[in-house]
């Protein structure tokens, strides 16, 4: 068996090799990841076998994967001291047996018309493992020795349809793969370059559990320096030494058992992956076994990143498969409203070369995502109050997006959102607490949206509600406008804007008051018509208000109208839209209004009435934080009114 034997590759493999060699594949560097991954698996297999066959590891117990780069000869060699392969195994594994994905890969290739363009994309979708080395190598030599074998095996191929195999002398157990690299263009990275290798290992294989080492040249002080006249070493005497350096951190703490990881390790790992100086607020570490097998280590940062609300903000969960990096910022794993979550998901049965397009459809990924989301909701609702509020202050606005983007989990998000209210004294309360605090006769959950708290709390729209001691949610974030569009009910109770339409006040006393108001309205009918015609370009109607107590006027919209705040937000974002006309509500119980009506009855066309109508409208605008058309005119008018009302004090 000692002679060199030449074999043809199987047809499928020949096709694949042909493709790889000629492809314009841009992610060439993945070959190193594939080889390192195989090496790591080989060490795993050895350790596993040694559990039942202790003799298998009689020497060479310092497990590692070594990379040797030779710039002069343009070669790179990857060596492991894993299980190695017998002659038959090499025959089987490398060259004869097509892997499960191979046929699929070739089929999809046949279906595509544009072979050139598709090939690069396809390579990414199917694992091509060992063969990916042919993307960068014109010839590959593999030398291996199985643990208990006497002889080694040498396999060699230029990827041109055949390979040779022979027995060789090899001292140590394990596998060496030597790649004779293709020449690269001047502007391309060379894979023999130390920094390039470091970068690739760090990016793709940092958490491989065995050291990935490389001999690097270092400048060190010489051992026997020349001395000066005083017998002291002359400075600056250095020599080049070769030292073996470990390139990967190996700290895949997500793959360890919870009880074996210290808090410091968790925090350090978080800081490393999140590039954050602050410790995380909370973490979630779990292992799922069964049909869908994966490890997850997720963190909630304590501070929101500055770009949380920037468009195309990257997600923070990286995807691994058996400690091998697959993809960073994997948005398929997490809904957008959880984009601040950082961490790692390591799914055992994942194709390393899976593309984003495939990932979106992937059943396994969908399953994992559903599960992660569930676990995060559990974590958030189990946080102690203080911690939760601190979380909410940082990420509440991102979380709220879930209400209108994630129909399935809308209720869970609704359970987590918090608002300040007219009665909460600056504290954030949940909708659940709101409902618990509702008055016995109260049917709806009231809210009001606007720019700031003090404006909302003093809004004329909620005067009556406050008077009745009904609590009102104060919503001050632009996103709240979208929240209330999607969240029309909570716990069966409708959410109602205090600013829109009529408030449903139904107890006996109020009914009487409403009737009285209606009576009065008849009296004011003519004046209302007059106000409506004077302000016809601004409002669509005038009516007696049942919301107002101290204020004299306010503007309200219909239930499906845009709120004043929403209109402001849209305008601020540069969206041009017709401003919807609203209804001017008048507090007919206000003592001034009767006087106004009298003035009107005396002289229907007087300038005073014109001025007063303008002021009624401007006051309504001002009280909701809006801008009036002519502030200086308003100033003059109010000045005159003051003068008038203070005349008796002359
Ligand atoms: P995969 O790793 O996805 O199975 P590869 O084409 O990369 O596919 O490798 C084929 C097989 O060759 C592996 O399953 C393994 O049995 C064997 N093999 C590859 N590299 C090594 C290695 N460094 N040591 C031992 N066996 C290896």
Image: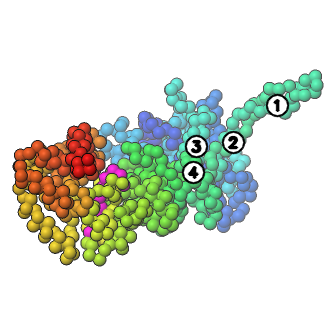
Of the image marks 2 and 4, the number of the one nearer the N terminus: 2
Q: Is mark 1 within 8 Å of ligand 1?
A: no
| Helix, strand or loop under label 3 | helix
| Helix, strand or loop under label 4 | loop
Give the CA separation, mark 1 to mark 4.
Answer: 42 Å
Is the residue marked by circle 1 packed among few (<14), some (14-19), or many (20+) residues within 10 Å?
some
Find residue 278 and name its label. 4
> What residue is rendered at 86% in x and 25% in y?
234
Find residue 25 and name its label. none
Give the CA separation, mark 1 to mark 3.
Answer: 31 Å
Q: Which residue is mark 1?
A: 222
Circles 1 and 4 in contact, beta carbons < 8 Å:
no
Q: Nearer the viewer, mark 2 or mark 4?
A: 4
Give the CA separation, mark 2 to mark 3.
Answer: 12 Å
| Helix, strand or loop under label 1 | loop
Residue extent of the magenta highlight: 444-453
Of the image marks 1 and 3, the number of the one nearer the N terminus: 3
| Helix, strand or loop under label 2 | strand
Is the residue marked by circle 2 packed among few (<14), some (14-19), or many (20+) residues within 10 Å?
some
Residue 192 picture location, percent across and down: 60, 33
Q: Is residue 450 magenta?
A: yes
Q: Please, is residue 476 above or below residue 19 in the view?
A: below
Q: Which residue is mark 3?
A: 201
Residue 513 picture location, percent across and down: 17, 70
Give the CA separation, mark 2 to mark 4.
Answer: 30 Å
């Amino acid at each position: 068996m000692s002679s060199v034997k030449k074999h043809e590759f199987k047809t499928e493999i020949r096709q694949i090799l042909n493709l790889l060699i000629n492809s314009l594949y841009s992610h060439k560097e993945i070959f190193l990841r594939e080889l390192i991954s195989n090496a790591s698996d080989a060490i795993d297999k050895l350790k596993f076998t040694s559990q039942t066959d202790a003799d298998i590891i009689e020497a060479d117990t310092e497990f590692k994967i070594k990379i040797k780069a030779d710039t002069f000869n343009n070669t790179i060699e990857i060596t492991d001291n894993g299980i190695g392969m017998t002659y038959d195994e090499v025959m089987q594994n490398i060259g004869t047996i097509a892997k499960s994905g191979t046929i699929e890969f070739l089929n999809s290739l046949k279906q595509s018309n544009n072979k050139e363009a598709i090939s690069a994309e396809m390579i990414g979708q199917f694992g091509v493992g060992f063969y990916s080395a042919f993307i960068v190598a014109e010839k590959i030599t593999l030398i291996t020795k199985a643990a208990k074998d006497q002889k080694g095996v040498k396999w060699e191929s230029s990827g041109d349809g055949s390979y040779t195999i022979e027995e060789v002398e090899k001292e140590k157990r394990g596998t060496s793969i030597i790649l004779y690299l293709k020449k690269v263009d001047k502007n391309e990275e060379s894979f023999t370059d130390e920094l390039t290798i470091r970068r690739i290992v760090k990016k793709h294989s940092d958490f491989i559990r065995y050291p990935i080492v490389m001999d690097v040249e270092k400048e060190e002080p010489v051992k026997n320096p020349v001395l000066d006249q005083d017998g002291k070493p002359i400075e600056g005497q250095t020599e080049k030494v070769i030292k073996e350096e470990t390139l990967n951190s190996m700290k895949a703490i997500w793959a360890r058992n919870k009880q074996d990881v210290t808090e410091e390790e968790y925090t350090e790992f978080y800081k490393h992956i999140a590039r954050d100086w602050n410790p995380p607020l909370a973490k979630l570490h779990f292992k799922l076994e069964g049909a869908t097998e994966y490890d997850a280590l997720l963190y909630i940062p304590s501070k929101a990143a500055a770009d949380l609300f920037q468009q195309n903000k990257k997600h923070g969960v990286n995807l691994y498969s058996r400690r091998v990096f697959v993809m960073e910022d994997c948005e398929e794993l997490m809904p957008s409203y959880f984009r601040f979550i950082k961490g790692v998901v390591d799914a055992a049965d994942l194709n390393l070369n899976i593309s984003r397009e495939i990932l979106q459809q992937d059943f396994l990924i969908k399953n994992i995502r559903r599960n992660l989301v569930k676990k995060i909701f559990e974590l958030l609702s189990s946080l102690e109050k203080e911690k939760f509020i601190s979380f909410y202050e940082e990420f509440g606005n991102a979380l709220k997006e879930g209400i209108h983007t994630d129909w399935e989990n809308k209720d869970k998000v609704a359970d987590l959102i918090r608002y300040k209210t007219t009665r909460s004294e600056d504290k954030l309360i949940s909708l659940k607490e709101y409902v618990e605090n509702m008055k016995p006769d109260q049917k709806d959950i009231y809210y009001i949206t606007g720019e700031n708290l003090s404006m909302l709390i003093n809004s004329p729209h909620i005067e009556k509600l406050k008077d009745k001691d009904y609590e009102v949610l104060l919503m001050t974030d632009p996103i709240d406008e979208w929240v209330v569009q999607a969240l029309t009910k909570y716990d069966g109770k409708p959410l109602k804007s205090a600013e829109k339409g009529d408030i449903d006040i139904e107890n006996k006393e109020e009914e009487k008051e409403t009737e009285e108001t209606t009576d009065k309205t008849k009296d004011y009918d003519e004046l209302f018509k007059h106000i409506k015609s004077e302000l016809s370009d601004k409002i669509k109607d005038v009516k007696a208000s049942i919301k107002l107590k101290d204020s004299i006027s306010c503007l309200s919209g219909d239930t499906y109208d845009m709120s004043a705040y929403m209109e402001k937000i849209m305008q601020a974002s540069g969206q041009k839209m017709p401003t919807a006309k609203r209804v001017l509500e008048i507090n007919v119980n206000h003592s001034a209004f009767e006087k106004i009506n009298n003035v009107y009855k005396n002289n229907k066309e007087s300038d005073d009435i014109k001025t007063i109508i303008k002021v009624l409208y401007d006051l309504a605008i001002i009280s909701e934080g809006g801008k009036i058309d002519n502030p200086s005119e308003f100033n003059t008018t109010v000045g005159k009114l003051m003068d008038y009302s203070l005349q008796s004090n002359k």
